[in-house]
Amino acid sequence: MTERGTWWRGQAVSALTAWTSADSGAGDAFTYSMACGAAAYLYGWADTRTLALLTKLRGERMPNGGYGLGRSYDAFADGTDNPAGTVYTVTLAGHVGPVLLSGYKAGAVPKAEIQDIVARVAGMQKLTVLRGQAVAYSDSPLDNPPIGYTSGCVHNVNAGAAWFLHDANAAGLGVTGMQRLITDITLTEVLAYREAETQWPYIDDRTFLDADHDSYSAESMYRLAYWIGREVAYRWMNNPPPAGEAKGPIIHTRIAGMPGGVGSWSRTLSGVTLWLEMSDRWRTEQVAYRQSCTGAALAQFAYYAARAAKVAG
């Protein structure tokens, strides 16, 4: 194992161990998907620790077959509460879906299980946008669009949905119209991108995303419109997160595990991604952030740190 791989693995193991010791069994789909994904990166899909967490993740599947928060939630603070059974796009495509897809590719998750997630993401309500397509924040009519918004397109959620469908298609999964949807979402997000600020708005054409969510858009667009995604990732890896954003340091954890690409490899070390190389300067920040995290944030850190360790080798 490389020095970087050893360092990131140590961070991931520390985080997952701390999270496991504190887990009361009251987690949600996001928390258990992050913990399960971290264990899979660290120990493999055949390991009993990973399979135990997969069982916990599956336990969060709602009676309607989807995944969400399992509680009522006013997603846009507009006075309308989505019911507890609401299925959220980001829970499917950004949290549960990628982990189950990884399990499917490893032979630990049946095809039908991940195919259902793919179909749900592709079949999510569509929003009215000027060009391209956008999927709704959830399957609740209250979010299509939320009160006071033109379309209600949440850009990181939209880009993440297309990235997940892209990866699912690469694994041989798909539904009718999926490639067109990926194409159209990419168009929508390219047009939403603000090149002067190197960021996306959070929703519609309003204020910008926080660092955490913007880095999710960056890694999604890295697969859909490479150079735009790369530019945003590069900016975040060159800079600290904005002051006051408690989850800001997760941007460096997330981007550290992105794959290499044209212009995204070390110029001096063969086989080392630019992102891993740039992550070295953030080690002190990352240790401090890990030590400050609890609950879902700790599981999320473990997931991205374990992914970085896997990429580092």
Image (cartoon, grey):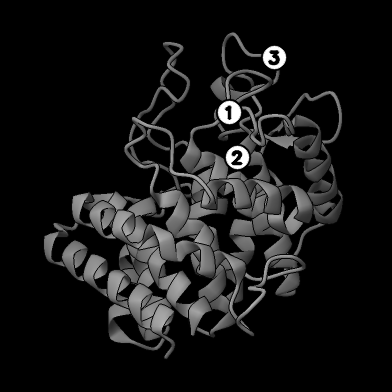
- Residue that appears at 43% across and 40% down: 241
* Alpha carbon distance from label 2 to label 1: 7 Å
- Residue that appears at 46% across and 71% down: 307
Q: Secondary structure at mark 2?
A: helix
Residue 198 percent coordinates (x, y): 67, 36
Kind of residue at badge 2: Asn
What is the quadrant of the N terminus in the image? Answer: bottom left
- Residue that appears at 77% across and 59% down: 175
Position of 28 with respect to 186 (left or right) is left
Res. 306 image quadrant: bottom left
- Residue that appears at 36% across and 56% down: 300
Kind of residue at badge 3: Thr
Write down the residue under mark 3: 150
Mark sitting earlier along the chain (2/1): 2
Res. 140 image quadrant: top right
* Alpha carbon distance from label 1 to label 3: 13 Å
Neighbours of disc 3 within 10 Å: few (<14), some (14-19), many (20+):
some
Mark sitting on residue 202 = 1
Residue 212 percent coordinates (x, y): 47, 42
| In-front residue for pair 36/177 | 36
Residue 124 percent coordinates (x, y): 66, 41
